[in-house]
Amino acid sequence: MARIYGTIESLKSLKTELEDKGITRFNSIGQIKDFIKNYNYERENIYDDIKIKLDKEYSEKCFDNEQRIQNRAEIINLETENKDNKISDLLKKIALIQNDKSKNVLKKLFLNVRLYSLKYRSKRLIKSKAEHIRAIVKDISRKIEIDGVFINRYENKRQQLIEQRAKAKIEKLEYTREVVENSMNLISGAIGENLVVKEIKKLSDDYVLINDFNLNFSDPIYFKKYNQRIKSIQIDHLLITKAGIFIIETKNWSKSSVNSRNLRSPIEQIERSNFALYIHVSESIILNEHHWGEQKIPIRNLIVMINHRPAENFKYVSVKLLKELNNYIKYFDPILTEDQVNRITTQLI
């Protein structure tokens, strides 16, 4: 398997773009592709999960409420009986005093005080009976009321309840889709570059791929052909082989984009990169093992189109489909040794 270094640039840009928008659920291009493909299924799953949880909650609350209502009735009956018994006892004592015919003045005075106390206590018990019972069952009555509101709403407005509970998750899902759709250019580029990496991985370890290769020049390089001063270059993939170096730019364009005159041609970009890389390699990498002198390191320009390519051929660059990539690379005869490939790799990484 080919040796791979670095992360593809569009994938890094895509990850930054998504994270800046608060989306961290994706760890790979495959996950993004699955999200796009399964969006409607995921949306329905949110509703299905809410329905299942809601139905379960409804069943549980119905059962719990029936138990609470039964328990409350038992508590009320028990407390009512307890209060009624106390009131009855007081009334019996009151009746006994009222039926007492004693002529003893002191005894009558005592009984009158006693009678007043008993009547006061009985009136308080009778008056506070209902309030006392309500206080005892206050908490359980509150739970019955709260669950009753839910049960009533479920039975009469179930769909509205489902929509309300699903709202936050659906909004988050729709926001994620919106961000992904607005990032389709980056996603398309990342998919294309990822496919190129997968294809090159099929080659042997004689091949070294550097993803998102960058060079910066403190002294800008003058490129006479386009009258430009090059301060830096960025290359999608730099492939180092025994046949030399391949500058690979990936384009995942539709057929209409390939034929459009409004999109900028990538050929100028790759020529610019080739010139700057040639200067850098010539100045920093010396291969003088050959008895004839210093060896030249070939640098070839290659644009890989994922699905569609122009019908025409162009100067200074080869344009190949993804399926043609590896056969094209392997077409060239080796001119460098394994040690030289490793030295070039070490210098460029």
Image: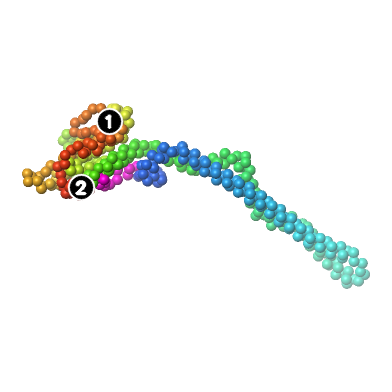
Disc sitting over residue 345 in the figure = 2
Which x, y percent locates residue 298? 16, 40
Who's the residue at 83% across and 61% down the image? 91
The residue labelled by disc 1 is 309
Residue type, label 2: Thr
Name the secondary structure under disc 2.
helix
Who's the residue at 60% across and 46% down the image? 58
Outermost residue, left side: 292
Q: Nearer the viewer, residue 69 or 52?
A: 52
Q: Is residue 125 left or right of residue 333?
A: right
Magenta span covers which residues? Answer: 1-14
Which x, y percent locates residue 153? 61, 42
Looking at the image, residue 315 lies above or below residue 4:
above
Which x, y percent locates residue 173? 45, 41
Total labels: the figure holds 2
Q: Is residue 95 left or right of residue 176?
A: right
First-in-chain label (1 vs 2): 1
